[in-house]
Amino acid sequence: MGVAIIGCGAIGSYLARSLDKGIIEDLEVKVLYDKILERARSLSSSLSCRPRIAETLQDVTCSEDVSLVIEAASQEAVRSYALEILESGKSLMIMSVGALADPDLFRRLKKMAETKGVRLYIPSGAIAGLDAVKAAGMAGISRVTLTSRKPLRVFEGNPYIKSKGIDLSRLEEPIVVYEGSASEACRLFPFSINVAATLSLASIGPERVRVRIIADPRAQGNIHEVVVEGDFGRLECRTINKPTPENPKTSFLAALSALATLKKAVDKVHIGT
Ligand SMILES: NC(=O)c1ccc[n+]([C@@H]2O[C@H](COP(=O)([O-])OP(=O)(O)OC[C@H]3O[C@@H](n4cnc5c(N)ncnc54)[C@H](O)[C@@H]3O)[C@@H](O)[C@H]2O)c1
């Protein structure tokens, strides 16, 4: 199956290199696209499969040898490209899941995927426990909370932190910088709380999932704690992530989760929920 990757940063590059090594049989990177063209060029030249460089989205959607597009770029990329990609008859994997906290966008993408008979993949990302959350949802979930503890560098340049007058440079102890719905969290922290959207889509929706974000001067990577209550009982799940070397905001597990989702897409045997 031919693959196109949109976004040649930490996740996109990791996926491209892994597929280039043949980690997943039957998947080959055919096209790379990045709004910074040079990133796509230099990634392509480092790969033995030498994918073509797309200069526009249409170069991706018109590629007949591509049947799956991987978005690893930004929420804005999802809003601008996702519908057109599905409309062109290609399956799509979305990493910037925060964009899907907008229920209208999610509904439109779902409908387009159904109309075109293609798939929309949303990997678990940097949290564990979604297998049990999905199973629990078959009966009924009453409460979901996500507590994310993050290193200070993750908040650099965040307008919400600035507007609250929070000075992280002097922080010695962890502080709660946000508490509210997953929906609002994804708007205020567009680069760093995608897991809240994924957890919401797998459970009770972005308005009802509660999110607490903690800035922790001692955290080395993102630590996510998920608590779910429902007819099944109670789930408590903690993931202590290491960041990717290329992007300290991005957990390595997010890239691995994307790779595992690709493998599941081609495997005939599925283990786990
Ligand atoms: N689902 C998860 O759990 C999870 C975890 C970590 C990161 N993410 C998200 O995945 C995405 C990629 O993460 P990353 O660490 O690789 O980011 P990155 O910043 O390292 O790379 C993103 C790349 O995409 C390109 N890009 C951005 N907007 C674009 C657009 N509109 N068109 C074309 N190219 C565009 C950038 O130029 C950059 O090269 C981000 O949105 C990030 O928030 C999701």
Image (cartoon, grey):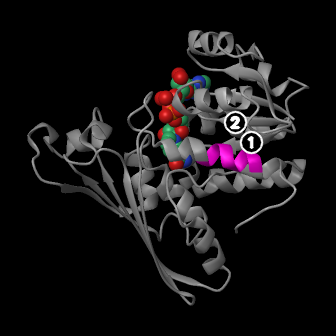
Residue at the image point whose x is 65% and y is 26% from the top = 17
Residue type indicated by callout 2: Ile
In this orientation, which residue lies closer to the viewer: 15 or 120? 15
Please state the total of marks drawn on the protein image: 2
Q: Which label belongs to residue 225?
A: none
Residue at the image point whose x is 67% and y is 27% from the top = 16
Residue type indicated by callout 1: Leu
Magenta stretch in the rendered image: 257-263
Task: Give the mark, 1 or 2, whose residue is nearer the N terminus.
Answer: 2
Disc 1 vs disc 2: Cβ atoms closer than 8 Å?
Answer: yes
Q: Which residue carries the number 2 mark?
A: 70
Q: Which residue carries the number 1 mark?
A: 92
Within 10 Å of disc 2 (Cα), the crowding (few <14, some 14-19, many 20+) is: many
What is the chief secondary structure element of the magenta stretch?
helix
Please determine whether, in this image, residue 44 is positioned above or below residue 169. above
Q: In the image, is 238 to the left or to the right of 115? A: left
The spot of residue 264 in percent (x, y) is 76, 52
The secondary element bearing badge 2 is classed as strand
